[in-house]
Amino acid sequence: MYDFIIIGAGIIGTNIARELSKYPFKTLVLEKENDVANHQTVANSAIVHAGHDPIEGSLKAILCVKGNALYEELEHELSIPLLRTGAFVLAHNDEEEQMLRDLKVRADHNGVPTSTILDGHTARKLEPNMSDSVTQVLSLPTTKVTYPWEVAFACLENAMKNGVEFRKNQEVTNIKWVKDRFVVETNFKETIETKHVISASGIFSDQIAHMLEKDVPYTIKPRRGEYYVLDRRVKGYLERVLYPLPTSKGKGVLLVPQVHGNILVGPTSVDQLDKVRTTTTPDGMKQIKEDAARLAKNIPFDKTIRTFAGIRAGSTYKDFFIQESKEFKGFYHVAGIDSPGLTAAPAIARYLVDEVIQPNVEKKENFDPFREEKIFFYTLSEDEQKKKIKENPLYGNIVCKCEKITEVEIMEAIHSPLGSDTIKGIKKRARAGSGLCQGGYCENTVLKIIARETGQSLDQINYYGKDTPILLKETKVK
Amino acid sequence: MKTHLLVIGGGAAGMAAAVSAANKGFDVLVVERDRELGGILNQCIHNGFGLKEFKEELTGPEYADRFMNQLNEHKIPYLLSTTVLDIVRKDHFTIKCSSVEKGLFEIEANAVILSTGCYERTRGAILLPGERPKGIMTAGSAQRYLNKDGYLVGRNVFILGSGDIGLIMARRMTLEGANVLGVAEIMPFSNGLTRNVVQCLHDFNIPLYLSHTVTDIRGKERLEGITIQEVNEKFQVIPNTEKSFEVDTLLLSVGLIPDVTLFDSLTLEIDPITKSVVVDQNYETNIPGLFACGNSLHVHDLVDEVSNESKKAGEAAVRYLMHDHKNKHTLIIEKNENVRYVVPQTIAYNQLEVEHIELSFRVTKKISSAIINVMQDGEIIQTKKARYLVPAEMLRIAIPKDKITGISSLVLAVKEV
């Protein structure tokens, strides 16, 4: 019997897994998808927000500011990418300047360090492509950008190193309370017993809760956001995250420099009933361009390499809902985690474990907080690269020419503890296919490397899920 | 490593350039990313290649083979499975390369020809709306999987864009047993060669929907269906013109873009239409000794034309190595509203060493009858009549070098008559 089952291996579930792995618990993470981090965690703005925006006193405000600080720790311990961009929130006129001052008061109240108001002229010297019509900005130096799914991989890898078990492709189909324990049923007709269940199931949180509870205290309200991804060759266009003033609908369309040099523009914010349809629309694409034009000039939309949409799992509760079930002790909701969920994730995990669960056992003495350093070959100096190639000549084979990803990095993505044998899985881990040609040059080679390394035939290799092969039918009998 | 001339890319353009520069007393070296020479020709197993170059009809691999043989005859060395990472220029060029065999290494060269071909425009670049299931792929990728690896990527297929690869793949996938339901083209005319529209679509009863584009994509894991709609002359979607197709595969043949990413660290003038570098009649960029040709300069209709152009680039590179031109003076070639782009974009008037300067260009729209004039200082220095001009087919006009007398701009004008 497990002490804890965590449902969901997104940014929240993986952070909780790592936090629980500090204790002598037997913990299992169940993920219904074929990979870690496949819904909100793989389709968001990637910002570690300063915490200027959530309402004072809310869990969102408290855990955002704490989470922001905790990312420094994650960077040190787990070798996750962290780009210290800082951010500007932009005002264009007297009315907006007043709103900016109010926002500064809120930021101070929330405990956001070192925010300052700058005039437009000063700000434009720092960010020359910022729109000419900007009159004032709120500067937020603690805003950062990370690589969200890498954070989830890192947390879960580290949790597994410290004893947590992980199973993917395991959809929870029912949860029952039998005598003194929870019985979790999965799509494999398996029943797993556990003392506690933590639901970190994002967009499906309310459905999971309904398996047990009669009265689920919230309903998930899916909100779709569309984005443009600009090629990393726009590097230098922008240093900081640019925000408009927040509205009741959220933070609005942003410009976000990414850790590997791309820029994200978006998101839109559209309520929808469907929980999984991540559609991009001509209207959405148009709206992003219009809204972004208020932030910056000459945005290089001609360097667009991709568009995508993500679903945010907001809820009717408004704030993060991190509570033990009133009906079933030992069942924990971690729900309604929309923005700033990525930022707050490490703080959410600590809050859940330390304040809500309050374990009555001591932490393990042998918890190892460190993960082996993860490097992207292209970021190394020439000497370091040469040294690596000497150790393994396959570093000399540049498979993804756009992003300069080597064969070794692709092999590592296949064979790492949380490895993957799908094209999308390799893209998430090694970034092959993330560039200008979107895999046009390298997908073919990546496919063959996966087949070689896993002993599968070419038409067995999936793009992502189990029925998504790239190649449908062999045409010639050899 | 050192060489006089380095050719980056061993496809149709690179091989022709290298062959034409051989045996002139200079070392020529070709670097190629793939495991073999030939580039995209190797996956073009259909015929129609070589009618101009060899006066006979060949398949892509056969055409490539001819040039490989020439390369071997001239004993031109080449490095395979080698990726060029960067080009640095000081007095000469330093080319940073990577391979399994040699690791990271540098090649010093006095002159460089870029012949890296082009890449395919992707879904992201054309902002195709809808969901993102698997089953959407560029036509060239599908061609490679089918012709080099022997696998079909789809059973029920729709093709967006009527570029030549899309048309060829419509036929090719039909022949391999796939069901190709149609081709949609946003322009009111095909973007491929007429012969391909006839031989690949008409002959197989595959409908071509002109002035149509894809407006929805459905499917969670695998593509389940698409919707196309008609567009007006401003490319706005016309409501209530939806046609739906249940397909598992959508191939994109929506344009090719010259791959000049290796020039990123250099300061080069870029032509916004070709999306490649600006060159003069010697295919030389504004950096002396740096040349570009083939599809990495502008996208050609026929490989024969790539070879022809690249030979000139190779010869020009040899002249550069012989004379070491430092002070180049150029004039600009302007174009009228009917001309979409012209290559070369400039003429180095103090380096007029070939008898004829050939301008390659495309028109912006269908023109049934036209006069093509090249003018300087208001005077017509070359003229030519032409019929049935379409944007999909590249046009040419040659100007005798002694007709260029002044230093003022040339004007290329296509007039409807």
Image (cartoon, coloured by chain):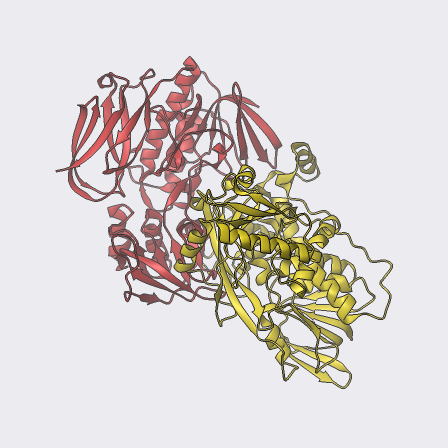
Which residue in the rendered view is the most extreme toward the bottom? A179
- Considering depth in this image, is A10 or A292 the residue closer to the camera? A292
Position of the N terminus of chain A, as image quadrant, is bottom right
Can residue A51 be seen in this snapshot?
no
Q: Colour of chain B?
A: red
Apparent side of residue B316 relative to residue A181 in the rendered image (left or right): left
Q: Is residue A477 above or below residue A313?
A: above
How far across and down, in percent of the image, does residue A196 sit?
Answer: 75, 75
Apparent side of residue B349 relative to residue B265 in the rendered image (left or right): left
Task: Name which quarter of the figure residue B193 lies in.
Answer: top left
Q: Is residue B389 above or below residue B402?
A: below
Query: What count of labels does the image hold?
Result: 0
Task: Name which quarter of the figure residue A316 lies in.
Answer: bottom right
Which residue in the rendered view is the most extreme toward the left? B417
- Considering depth in this image, is A294 or B34 the residue closer to the camera? A294
- Considering depth in this image, is A176 or B281 the residue closer to the camera? A176
Q: Colour of chain A?
A: yellow
How far across and down, in percent of the image, does residue A301 sit?
Answer: 44, 46
How far across and down, in percent of the image, does residue A428 sit?
Answer: 59, 54
Q: Is residue A143 above or below residue A166?
A: above
